Amino acid sequence: MLVCWYNLWVRVICYGLTTA
């Protein structure tokens, strides 16, 4: 998702969701 790279915090959240 490109949205995951829009902001650092969003990236961290997306990373956590994808690894969960």
Image (cartoon, rainbow, N blue to C red):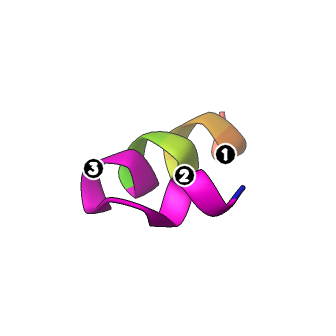
| Left or right relative to 18: residue 7 | left
Residue type at mark 1 is Thr
Residue 9: mark in rendering: 3
Image depth: mark 2 or mark 3 in front: 3
The one nearer the camera, 7 or 14, is 7
Gap in Å between the C-alphas at discs 2 and 3?
10 Å
| Left or right relative to 8: residue 5 | right
Image depth: mark 1 or mark 2 in front: 2
Badge 3: residue crowd in 10 Å (few <14, some 14–19, many ≥20): few
The one nearer the camera, 19 or 8, is 8
Disc 1 to disc 2: CB gap under 8 Å: yes
The one nearer the camera, 12 or 7, is 7
Q: Position of residue 5 (x, y in %)?
A: 49, 66
Magenta span main SS: helix
Local SS, label 1 = helix
- Please tell me which residue is depicted at 54% across the width and 45% down the height of the picture: 14
N-terminal label among 2 and 3? 3
Local SS, label 3 = helix
N-terminal label among 1 and 3? 3
Disc 2 to disc 3: CB gap under 8 Å: no
Gap in Å between the C-alphas at discs 1 and 3?
15 Å
Residue type at mark 3 is Trp
Residue 19: mark in rendering: 1
Find the magenta span and give its range.
Answer: 2-11
| Left or right relative to 11: residue 19 | right
Q: Position of residue 2 (x, y in %)?
A: 65, 62
Residue 15: mark in rendering: 2
Magenta residue check for 12: no
Q: Position of residue 9 (x, y in %)?
A: 27, 50
Q: Position of residue 13 (x, y in %)?
A: 43, 40
